[in-house]
Image (cartoon, helix red, strand yellow):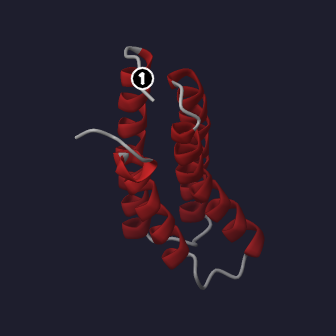
């Protein structure tokens, strides 16, 4: 499938689902600092994928995908913290972790692809 807009990118679609998961799971969390941090990190993943794609060039896109990957690592780290301090049960922790791993694989594959091809814009 040809990617014509950021909404076609699989890692963006999965990141959107991660944002939904994070917002649902932490909806009742009263630790507003923690809640804000994990929500912002999740939003940053999908936002940077979109921004990078619409910059046009592969080099810029890879740059923003790398930022996205950093935000993903932040979500993964905060996921561990949430488990350790009792904000998540093991099922929720596993679900977030699994989605993060999927996004990581998609981002890494997309970065590899962009480094080895010239995108026509």
| Residue 35 sits in quarter | bottom right
| Number of marks drawn | 1
- Extreme-front residue of the structure: 121
- Extreme-left residue of the structure: 1
Observer-nearest of 61 and 15: 61
Residue under the point 59% across and 58% down: 43
Query: Vertically, is 97 above or below 2?
Result: below
Q: Tell me where residue 20 appears, x and y as whole percent.
A: 47, 70
- Extreme-right residue of the structure: 33
Q: Tell me where residue 91 appears, x and y as whole percent.
A: 36, 68
- Report which residue position mark 1 lands on: 114
The quadrant the N terminus occupies is: top left
Observer-nearest of 95 and 81: 95
Say which element carries label 1. Answer: helix
Q: Is 39 placed left or right of 18 in the picture? A: right
Observer-nearest of 39 and 114: 114
- Extreme-bottom residue of the structure: 28
Residue under the point 54% across and 41% down: 54
Q: Is 20 placed left or right of 63 in the picture? A: left
| Residue 23 sits in quarter | bottom right
Q: Tell me where residue 42 appears, x and y as whole percent.
A: 57, 57
Residue under the point 64% across and 80% down: 29
- Binning the other alpha carbons within 10 Å of mark 1 as few (below 14), some (14 to 19) or many (20 upward) gives some
Q: Tell me where residue 104 appears, x and y as whole percent.
A: 42, 39
Q: Is 97 placed left or right of 53 in the picture? A: left
The quadrant the C terminus occupies is: top left
């Amino acid at each position: 499938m040809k990617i014509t807009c950021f909404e076609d990118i699989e890692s963006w679609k999965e990141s959107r689902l991660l944002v939904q998961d994070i917002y649902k799971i932490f909806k009742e969390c009263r630790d507003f600092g923690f809640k804000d941090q994990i929500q912002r990190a999740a939003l940053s993943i999908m936002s940077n994928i979109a921004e990078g794609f619409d910059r046009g060039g592969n080099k810029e896109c890879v740059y923003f995908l790398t930022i996205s990957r950093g935000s993903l690592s932040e979500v993964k780290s905060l996921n561990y913290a949430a488990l350790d301090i009792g904000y998540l049960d093991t099922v929720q922790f596993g679900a977030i972790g699994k989605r993060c791993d999927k996004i990581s694989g998609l981002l890494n594959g997309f970065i590899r692809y962009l480094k080895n091809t010239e995108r026509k814009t």
